[in-house]
Amino acid sequence: MDKPLRLRFRPGDLVAVSAIALLASAVALIFLTGSGTGPAEAEIRQNGELIDTIPLDRDTEFVISGDYENTVTVKDGEIAITVSDCPGEDCVHSGWRSSAGQSIVCLPNLVEIRIVPADGGETGVDGVTG
Amino acid sequence: MGNSKKLALQAILVAAALALSYLERFIPLQLLIPLPGVKLGLANIVSLFALYFLGWRSAFIILILRCTLGSVFGGGVTALMFSLTGGLLSMSVMALARHIPFFSVYGVSLCGAAAHNIGQILVAALTLSSVYIFAYLPFLLLVGLVTGMLTGAVASACFRALIASGQWSLPQ
């Protein structure tokens, strides 16, 4: 009865496991290899538009407003959204980021903080569309 | 199954899926893995049930109703766009994966979880017009491996218990 219904774990399911793991590794290779350790700066984007670029070597704190308010803190070469009134506060839970290629996102406020090498070079991918 | 029985069952499943989505908000998975979009996906058990016992048409109807009502109760248009894209992609993939002979309900659940992640990342990338969002995908996929196995296990246990009770049987 059970066999034609295929309700118990079967060896074939490992194909799905491997395929997903493989896809995860491939995407990770493409997007995370560019992460560098050199001097970095943060590009602040809202609605996909670059609204500010700030160096990470100078401590500062400012607020991005929009539908919600994100308080961004730069300290000891790291950046984080430290306070936010958005639902869920995933951006605050993301914590501190410091190396190029990393990013912090606040979807409700349409904010993306992307860390890039200070020389302005791209990381990981060849180009950006959209 | 009669039409009115099927209609009542669909309504119950929409309610069950909404209740499960609501319930899992109280499970602080994001404290463990602080990434946007990380969740258990308990409502996917309902999707799997609908897909296996009622067929893909019912499964899609239940999914669309669940997403729409869910965004009415909280979340709004952005949330609707995310849950609908993730949900529709996930359901399409699961409806196909169900017919792959070497997959059990576990494999179907895993494919659904991965498709859901990919759908949500796609919407996020479009919303923010940024391809960099895909950097999150590997983490989401790995979390999806675990949660997909988990929901697959619950679905498997439920389905076997339902069939053993004699009141339910799988079509086909």
Image (cartoon, coloured by chain):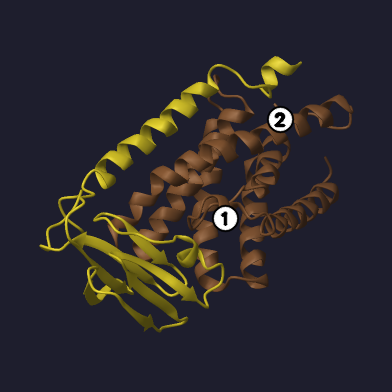
Chain colours: A yellow, B brown
Residue visible at 48% across and 28% down? A16
Residue for point 61% across, 49% down: B60
Q: Residue B123's quadrant in the figure?
A: bottom left
Q: Is residue A7 above or below residue B126?
A: above
**Can you give x and y, in whole percent of width and height, for residue B5 in the image?**
85, 48
Cα distance, mark 1 to mark 2? 28 Å
Q: Quarter of the image containing the N terminus of chain A?
A: top right
- Give a yes or no on whether discs 1 and 2 share a subunit: yes
Amino acid at dot 2: Ser
Which of the 4 quarters of the picture holds residue B156?
A: top right
Name the kind of residue labelled 1 in the image. Answer: Leu
Q: Find residue B156 and name its label.
A: 2
Residue, disc 1? B31
Q: Is residue B45 left or right of residue A117?
A: right
Q: Is residue B78 visible?
A: yes
Q: Nearer the viewer, residue B16 or A41?
A: A41
Of A8 and A21, nearer the camera is A21
Q: Is residue A8 left or right of residue B140?
A: right
Which tag, 1 or 2, sits closer to the chain's start?
1
Q: Which of marks 1 and 2 is in front?
A: 1
Residue B55 badge: none
B83 w.r.t. A33: above or below: below
Q: What chain does mark 2 sit on?
A: B
